[in-house]
Image (cartoon, coloured by chain):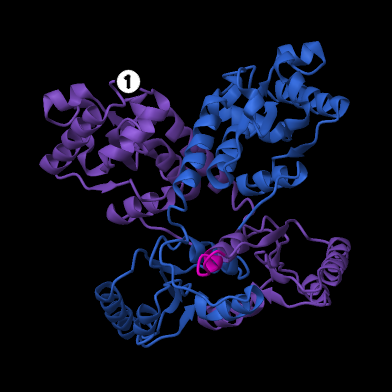
Chain colours: A purple, B blue
Amino acid sequence: MEERPAIFLISDRTGITIEKLVHTLLTQFDNATTDAHFRAFQDTPEKISKLVDEIDTFAEREGVAPLVFSSVVDESLRKQLKTAKTEIVDIFDIFLPNLSTALHKPMNQNVGKAHGMGTESEYERRVEAVNYALSYDDGARIKGLDKADLILMGVSRSGKTPTCLYLAMQYKVLAANYPLTEDDFMEGRLPEPLKPFKEKLFGLSITPERLHQIREERRPGSKYASIDQCRREITAAESLYRQQGIQFVDSTAVSIEELAIAVMQQIGMKRGV
Amino acid sequence: MEERPAIFLISDRTGITIEKLVHTLLTQFDNATTDAHFRAFQDTPEKISKLVDEIDTFAEREGVAPLVFSSVVDESLRKQLKTAKTEIVDIFDIFLPNLSTALHKPMNQNVGKAHGMGTESEYERRVEAVNYALSYDDGARIKGLDKADLILMGVSRSGKTPTCLYLAMQYKVLAANYPLTEDDFMEGRLPEPLKPFKEKLFGLSITPERLHQIREERRPGSKYASIDQCRREITAAESLYRQQGIQFVDSTAVSIEELAIAVMQQIGMKRGV
């Protein structure tokens, strides 16, 4: 039987940071399945006290102490958590001394800023970006494209929508998308509404085989999903990109995150922390 | 003048993990503005060599060495990166020994798994979840609600759409949302289409002042945006939640991440790593 080591992920807020961190670390072990216990919003002595009991009981019952990752900020809560009879990997203990030296600043204890609201205007820009992506999905609107930071183009089902939504959600990018259709290929030039925005265009491609597979799920047996049609559209799209000097990436073996970051990097958009 | 310490964030893939980590760490310093340099997809000796040059040149020019965070996986690329004349905070160096002990496993070097594709079926479930959220946005469809993991309800502009999209994108949750309208409040009971799914319902609330502000931006001076209307709708929505025993949260001072995690936690959805 596969052993599934227990990991507790403890945060005073969402726990998203340690979630990503532990996820990344675990990818470095083959077949590492874990029994993950998330405990978010652990921000009072009462909650931490219950949690310490839970961890100790767990360790006693299972005969092995769980590994605990913590991103709890408050000094006294961190001390309290460390009374649990197991190893606590505290990301602030680990990284703050480094960073404090580099920043020439003492640390404060700002609970809730990590994945908190940020400023109100940040929240609004984010919601605005999501709404923009939804309004300008699939070429739905043309007017207002001048506001876009980026216009993703590609054939139907090449991954435009999730990429735009991810860029909006995570990076507040105003990302529109525009579907390339048979008509556009007949013309053999840039679709009229896109002409003024050439520097914002970015293309998606995909292998015909994968596109065929995705479209088959949606409309089985259709001309739209046929391998011939997929092949024709992809060839036409890529030749359009090349002819117009539009950068493009192949989305076939790439995650939404990778696509989003690759696009941002290639068009020189700055990420901040 | 405010000093802006330089930080390099280096990854062989997207750099999202160290982006979140550094972001969280920086929240613990007041007014810490940094000059962040992201270098994603650094996965060849040639790229790392250029990067080492860039870091050294930067340090010489600025008179101070930048702080470097790295999530590069490959052992020889990591060694090469460490020839730069500055401190490299290597998250694998820091965490893997701990984790290796806990997992009773040696580490491997699986570049690109961290925010890579995962399995194809994971990718598909994610895109499916995003499409579901888009199709079932704002009560657009009723048929198929039985497939939802979760149905978010709330008045117009209370934050339903971004929360559903976030849950879909990050956690592959099938999240529908349903807008509560005047008609629903007149009835004083659960909207008919939602009755079969009581255990999947979750409510959003918001302060009338904030709702008023948000709606004013959309339709200035309208009845819809008036503080009286907002107050009436919120009061009615909360009394419906209470009467029906539906859990709800106030989205006013909460980020999309916090909302999403709070909802998942309260309805007992499991997160994995």
Check the residue under mark 1 and report the chain it is in. A
Q: Which residue is drawn at the image coordinates 63% and 50% (left, top)?
A: A117
Q: Compared with residue A223, is residue B91 higher up or lower down, i.e. above or below?
A: below
Which residue, given by chain and number where applicable, does mark 1 sit on? A222
> Which secondary structure class fits the magenta region best?
loop
The magenta-colored residue range is A24-31
Q: Nearer the viewer, residue A58 or B53?
A: A58
* Residue most extreme to the front: A1
Image spot of residue B15 (x, y percent): 44, 63
- Which of the 4 image quadrants contains residue B173? top right
The reply to whether residue A250 is visible in this rendering is yes
Q: Which residue is drawn at the image coordinates 19% and 44% (left, top)?
A: A246
Q: Nearer the viewer, residue B263 or B148?
A: B148
Q: Residue A27 lies in magenta, yes or no?
A: yes
Q: Is residue B38 left or right of residue A191?
A: right
- Which of the 4 image quadrants contains residue B83? bottom left
The reply to whether residue A104 is visible in this rendering is no
